[in-house]
Amino acid sequence: MTSALTAITGVGGGMILIGLMPLFVPAAAVVPVHGVTQLVSNATRAWFGREALDWRYVGQFLVGSLVGLAVFGVLIRYVELTLIPLFIGVYILLITWSSAFNRLIRRFESFFWVGFLQTGLGVFVGTPGPLNIAVLNKHYDNNHVVVTTGALMMTVVHSAKLLVYLSLGFAFTEYWQLLVMMVIMATVGSWLGTRLRQRISMLWLKKMLPWLLTMLALRLIGGIVYQQFLLHQGLAPQ
């Protein structure tokens, strides 16, 4: 469903998915498992809409993403991975409600800096938000070009993110059954959403997204705070 949502609207699905995932998988597995699913979701969305692809800015984005991979791939080694849901929750609240935060990140409007920033954020919080979509909307009037080209760019981001977690030794094979099912359903969602994009209006859902994302973010932050409280009181295993 989240893959179909993004295929229709261009935004929102990845953030909803990663907001729900800490309810089902260990904190340290959220970003890499989400990354595999989003890689397939975006790659298939780009493929199903390939007639609308525009490669003009992809090269700049790729170079920026590779630089971001090198920089943030080192920084993530000094982060406690069990705190990843906290980072995700805070990031969702900032990108949803803080105009100052959004103005700050939207200063990076060359596709090199967009690739750098989105890859860096993706390593830490899984889904780096719709920065590339916001910039693409300034270059194209055609929503199909924006959604499809944005999906290709996010394929680059999630590929880079998975390289980081492979280098950290994350055992993807331990989650192979979950990954297989999520990959299959992400592909189906991309196929369905691509076909529904011209047929239905999702304006009502776009209006609901900020509130849904806020509830998910508060749930993530509250869970981490409660867990840390239990640890501090000696009521939970470290």
Image: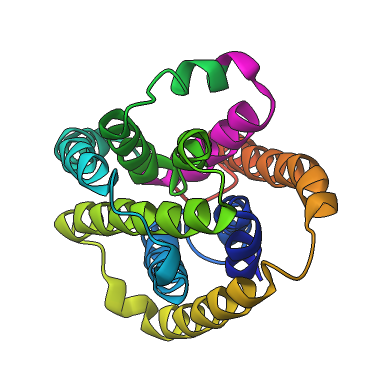
**Left or right of 217: which side holds 153?**
left
Residue 37 visible in the picture? no
Closest to the observer, 178 or 236: 178
Measured as percent of width and height from the top left, residue 143 is found at: 58, 53
Is the residue 162 above or below the residue 99 in the image? below
**Magenta span:** 81-100
Query: Left or right: where does residue 67 sit relative to residue 134?
Result: left
Q: Pick whichever, 102 or 72, lies toward us.
A: 102
222 is within the stretch colored magenta: no
Whether residue 194 can be seen here: yes
Say if 226 sits above or below 109 in the image.
Answer: below
Foreground pick, 27 / 167: 167
Q: Position of residue 168 (x, y in %)?
A: 19, 54
Q: For this rendering, which residue is in front, 67 or 217? A: 67
- Residue reaching furthest to the right: 204
For this view, does 189 lie left or right of residue 238?
Answer: right
Q: Residue at x 81, y 43 (%)?
A: 207
* Residue lying at 48% horizontally and 55% vertically, measured from the top left: 145
Q: Is residue 148 above or below residue 231?
A: below
Majority secondary structure in the magenta region: helix
